[in-house]
Image: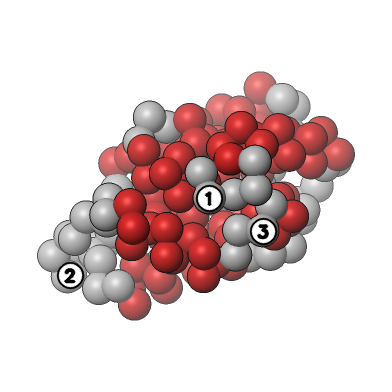
Amino acid sequence: MISPYIQFDNFTENARQALTLAYQEAAKQKHGYVGIEQLLLGIASESEGVAGRVLTQLELSPDNIKQQVKLSQHGVFVPEGATGVSPVLYRVFEAAVDQANKTGQAYVNTGHLLLRLIDNGDDVAKDVLKAANGGVENVQIHTQQLLQQVSPTASTE
């Protein structure tokens, strides 16, 4: 379990896979916490979810995102041995759960996570997504359009 406070059983299979990929990326980078950068990479690498499809459509691959993260220089090193998610990422999870609930969706999917990454007030996701075809606003528009097509009870995307 990623956090004792968030129930990840109401995340879609694709969202949980994106979280797993984010954890793997954090371990590869020797970060003790999963942060915004790692979740963004996990979402992009999980190509079948709403967010992965949007990023692919807008020509933003996981490799492009990795390069943009390095250029943004927002990555924060956390000593090895720590576990869990950053406080900012925890707030992203909470906001994604809230958004799914408000829109009548039973499950949080990668689209909810991507939108909340953009809106969290941290510049990492915005800096990276500026490289997308059409910029951050286009990512938001495409994600919202795809979210409207997802069944409210879909546990997969």
Residue for badge 2 = 81
Quarter holding the N terminus is bottom left
**Residue 59 disc label:** 3
> Where's residue 28, x and y in %?
34, 77
Label 2, label 3: how far apart the Cα atoms are: 35 Å
What kind of element bears circle 1? loop
How many C-alpha atoms fall within 10 Å of the one at disc 1: few (<14), some, or many (≥20)? Answer: some
Q: Residue visible at 39% across and 50% down?
A: 36
Which SS class for mark 3? Answer: loop
Structural crowding at the residue carrying mark 2, measured as other residues with C-alpha within 10 Å and reported as few (<14), some (14–19) or many (≥20): few
89 lies left or right of 95: left
Q: Which dot, 1 or 2, sits closer to the camera?
A: 1
Q: Residue 68 carries which label?
A: none
Q: Disc 1 vs disc 2: Cβ atoms closer than 8 Å? A: no
Residue name at image x 67 percent, y 58 percent: 59
Residue 49 drawn at (x, y percent): 71, 56
